[in-house]
Image (cartoon, grey):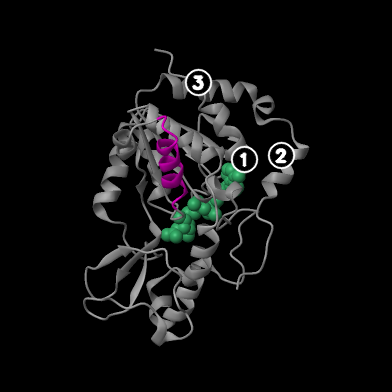
Amino acid sequence: MEEARQPEGAQQREETQQPEEAQQPEEMDHARRLINSADRILILTGAGVSAESGVPTFRGSDGLWGKYRPEELATPEAFQADPRLVWEWYGVRRERVGACRPNAAHEAIARLTLEREGARLVTQNVDGLHELALEEAVSNGAYSRSSASGAAPIRLHGSLFGTRCTGCDYRTMDRHPVDVENEASLPRCGKCAALLRPDVVWFGEQLDPGILQSAVEAAETAEVCLVVGTSALVHPAASLPLLTRESGGVVVEVNTEPTPLTEVAVVSIRGPAGQILPHLLSVEPER
Ligand code: OAD
């Protein structure tokens, strides 16, 4: 259904560029020192962290979701007007994302949150790749299951594989393909028969207050907010690094392009997260 597109522009860049470590050595050192000397770190991720896994971003030069326009489809009004079309878009995304694997950035973040008690991950992503990287790190035997539960990401915008009822409080996780043949074939609630919808936060909707509160607390108590692969245009997620700064902490950014947070960041590292983060997060705390 979706137009084929080569998502790994980053793969081509890998062949022509120097290793990222060599490109901005001072910035890398500065960022590493900040991260290694902090007790509390918030990592805030956006779609860019999954770009090298083959998940298209929403905006930026690699941003494309085929024939669909996210701003027009990710709204309650769009679902009310044409639930079949909205489910079709989510079906395309589930299928595409379901075939993607965590990349080196997800793995480096998973290791950091498993190893450092004070590291908290907040993600805007609904693709489940952070969770998969955590599961894989644990199943490889290097970490315990209990440390993995403390490392679970705070998911601001829900999950692509979550489904919830439009009529009652029923919600579930379900990776099965959705039949989008016609409106009658769309999934319905087993309890009240109302239409089920993707369990993601759409434009114009409020974030879950408990989830937002946890993210705000993590931002306000963090000494370092490491922002990775987000255009920083969607709030309240984009405001979290500002809370860290207002509370006396610093912001470090990793992105292929400048963003509104670049001016706020004490260090901004330009490049693909999958190349930068394994270097940035590789050193043990100096204590
Ligand atoms: P965007 O698509 O807006 O931004 C992706 C960012 O990642 C851009 O700033 C790119 O420059 C950067 N980027 C691309 N490839 C990268 C790479 N390999 N390494 C590092 N950075 C890279 O995605 P988000 O900021 O996550 O909301 O978008 C925020 C929200 O808007 C999403 O959660 C979604 C969307 O509408 C909902 O669905 C509610």
Q: Is mark 3 within 8 Å of ligand 1?
A: no
Whether label 1 touches label 2, CB < 8 Å: yes
Q: Residue at x 30, y 49 (%)?
A: 212
- N-term-proximal mark, 2 vs 3: 2
List the residue tagged with mark 2.
Answer: 14
Q: Residue at x 26, y 46 (%)?
A: 213
Crowding near pointer 2: few (<14 within 10 Å), some, many (20+)? some
Under circle 1, the secondary element is: loop
Residue type at mark 3 is Val
Q: Nearer the viewer, residue 61 or 13?
A: 13
Q: Is residue 187 among what the camera can see?
A: yes
List the residue tagged with mark 1.
Answer: 272
State the separation of the CA atoms marked 1 and 2.
9 Å
Whether label 2 touches label 3, CB < 8 Å: no
State the separation of the CA atoms marked 2 and 3.
23 Å
Q: Is mark 1 within 8 Å of ligand 1?
A: yes
Quadrant showing the C terminus: top left
Residue type at mark 1 is Pro
Q: Nearer the viewer, residue 209 or 244?
A: 209
Q: Is residue 34 left or right of residue 21?
A: left
- Looking at the magenta stretch, what is its main secondary structure? helix
Whether label 3 touches label 1, CB < 8 Å: no
Under circle 3, the secondary element is: loop
Q: Which residues are magenta?
A: 128-142
Q: Is residue 24 left or right of residue 209?
A: right
- Reply above or below: 103 against 71: above
Q: Residue at x 39, y 87 (%)?
A: 184
Q: Nearer the viewer, residue 251 or 176?
A: 176
- N-term-proximal mark, 1 vs 2: 2
